[in-house]
Image: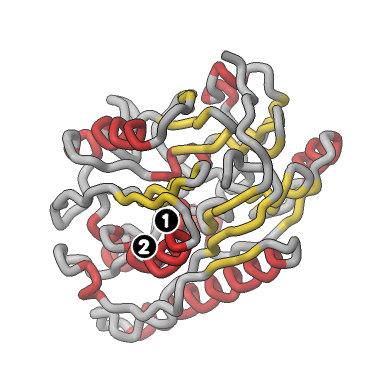
Amino acid sequence: MIWTEWDKLTEIIVGDVYDDISSLDVNDNEFKEGMHRILEETREDLNKLSELIKSFNVKVYRPKQLKFRPEQTRVFNSIVPYPAVFPRDMHIVYGNQIINTIGGDPNRYNESDFFVEIMTELFNQGRDYISMPKPLLSNDYIDYKDHEGKILYHAANILKCGDTLLYSTPYTDKFVGRGTHTGFKWIKQHVKNVRWAEVKRPGHADGRIALLAPKVLLAKETNLIPRELRDWDVVKINSKALPRDFEIFRQTSFYSSRVKEWLNTWIGNVDETVFDINVLSIDPYNVISNSYDKDIATELKKRGINLIPFNFRHKFFFDGGLHCATLDLSREGERETYVTR
């Protein structure tokens, strides 16, 4: 069972990447070598993360070694299908349920296939597993508002808070989201007897708020915190500029002609994920962070929470942190009320 983001962790999935991309249809060996290094170092980091989590007596599941095969996306003309690096994006785990969701990116259409063996094992252990029906998509990524009517919704839009689930609205006229209203309706039909509290902006909720312990949360923009959490203790994260080298890289012709052309779904603009928020709680007293911020560590220590720094080297490349790269499957604790009604 699992009811929160912070109770003592007992089981988790840690993501993985392709072992190599030698079959990538790109006539640029230097580019391939660079990509191979990114994947190799990411695998090293995810392996180290697994060992760190195991040191807290947590059972860790990993997808089997991944072979890069562009034909994996059978339906679409995808050059580089997304690896299994972020299990969180497409799996909601709440109570005894596991819900496999689907997004609107054709490069991620078959991403969940990497986790089927793990999900089958969990199903045989008694977990209630269900998968969204997969709609047909176009070859190109389009805004979710243009997908409306299809059942699409990213699982990372949801955070667990006892008998309440925090969610981000699929999209608005101003902000691009990660799902359709039809998809969110489907989710609500399959998660019974739960309260819903809205995070006031579309996109992945774990890039907006981190629930660390009962009544303690991290946030960058406090106006996005649901009104139901208005009495929580908020640790405010100050805005930080992106690394200068990364900003310069985004403006280069290489980024436009290579990274965006060949890997446009593997790298984000780092506009959504706030890495100091995208953390993983081991229990109410220990949280693993993508970096070490002295001010945040000091504030958390005042609240009895230990900040454990971890260097996920290519978080900017993948636009995702440690919460994205993991999927907590079970935690100790009961289904309780933590929000104001």
- Gap between marks 1 and 2 measured at Cα: 6 Å
Q: Residue at x 31, y 39 (%)?
A: 179
Residue 320 visible, this orientation: yes
Residue 254 visible, this orientation: no
Q: Are marks 1 and 2 in contact (CB under 8 Å)?
A: yes
Q: Residue at x 61, y 33 (%)?
A: 335
Q: Which residue is mark 2?
A: 255
Q: What secondary structure is marked by label 2?
A: helix
Residue 266 picture location, percent across and down? 37, 61
Rendered view: 115 above or below 324: below
**Residue 20 occupies quadrant:** bottom left
Of pointers 1 and 2, the one earlier in the residue sequence: 1
Most extreme residue toward the top, as rendered? 341
Residue 321 picture location, percent across and down? 55, 54
Q: Residue at x 21, y 51 (%)?
A: 134
Residue 155 picture location, percent across and down? 41, 44
Inspect the image, locate mark 1, and give the three-letter code of the amino acid beneath it. Answer: Arg
